[in-house]
Amino acid sequence: MYICSLMKPFEEYPYTKEHIAKKIADILALERPNVNRKSALQFIMSSIDLTTLNGDDTDTTVASLCQKALSFENTAKDIPAVAAVCVYPPFVRLAKGLLSEYPVNVASVAGCFPSGQSPLFIKLLEVVYAVKEGADEIDMVISRGKFLEGKFEEVGNEISAIREACGKAHLKVILETGELHTIENIRKASEIAILSGADFIKTSTGKTTPAATLEASYVMMETIAEYYQKTGIQIGFKPAGGIAEPDDAIDYYILLRHILGEKWMNNRLFRTGASRLADKIYNELI
């Protein structure tokens, strides 16, 4: 249950959006020249959640996505498999059956994705269904309307209830940062999600504009870092939405390494939500 902050109130932070943008520009300018591009792309590939979340998805669509997920791994070229396939709940059983013998997880959006605009009991039913069907991971989205009304405890309690419904499945909490409007709100939503049981915090559903941004990601990673400093607990991070080019993905990789460090450089604690990106990385690595 979300009760109170373990962290410094955001008002005490000397950050504005402009300040954060300047810090990011400085970090990228300093570290881009030193990036081992091949190693970075191998890491990013291993962290991709290959996704299909369309209204016209079919069994054929999902089966093709699972085959595609398995096709990327190439040991001769040191190209790793992707981390997971992400689908709507009705397709979880199919995806699990196709991937159960391989090191690729099945993730499912649940809890009335992408709007989050349904009563909690309906959200919980969908989460429980997806987990019973075999989902290893659940991607939920917070109730932005409630958050923007200042109903922070209600938002936190919803996340806590969904965390409990997930059982052993990992919970990624999507903030939908493009609809939160301010840096302060992104910071507060990150904090609520972490304190309410999120295993990961994630930028976006990919269904709104803007989706993932470096500025939102910076704030979210800083919040994760502060929580780790205070508790020793590691929370994962996932930028998602609009990351289609390898160079863009490498910028997130640089921020991750700079802010959170080597302990986060694995796909247990970092994911990238980007399906178009996988083909481009594969074509470059092959």
Image (cartoon, rainbow, N blue to C red):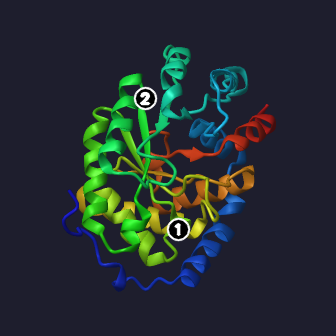
* Image location (x, y in percent) of residue 53: 60, 40
* Image location (x, y in percent) of residue 144: 43, 64
Q: Which of 244 and 25 is in front in this view?
A: 244
Q: Nearer the viewer, residue 30 or 173?
A: 173
> In terms of secondary structure, where does tag 2 sit?
loop
Check if mark 1's residue and mark 2's residue have beta carbons within 8 Å: no
Residue displayed at 62% across by 53% down: 241
Q: Residues within 10 Å of mark 1 (few under 14, many from 20)?
A: some
Q: Could you tell me the amino acid type at mark 1?
A: Glu
- Quadrant for the C terminus, please: top right
Residue 140 located left or right of residue 40? left
Relative to 225, residue 44 above or below: above
* Image location (x, y in percent) of residue 255: 56, 61
User: Can residue 233 be seen at all in this image of the molecule?
Assistant: no
Relative to 165, residue 257 above or below: below
- Quadrant for the N terminus, please: bottom left
C-alpha distance separating marks 1 and 2: 27 Å
Q: Nearer the viewer, residue 77 or 112?
A: 112
* Image location (x, y in percent) of residue 122: 35, 43
Residue displayed at 33% across by 33% down: 128
**First reached walking from the N terminus: tag 1 or tag 2:** 2
Q: Residues within 10 Å of mark 2 (few under 14, many from 20)?
A: many
Residue 37 located left or right of residue 197? right
Q: Name the residue under label 1.
A: 179
| Viewer-nearest of discs 1 and 2 | 1
Residue displayed at 64% across by 26% down: 58
Q: Which of 121 and 195 is in front in this view?
A: 121
Q: Could you tell me the amino acid type at mark 2?
A: Ala
Q: Mark 2 points at which residue?
A: 135
Relative to 69, residue 255 above or below: below
> In terms of secondary structure, where does tag 1 sit?
helix
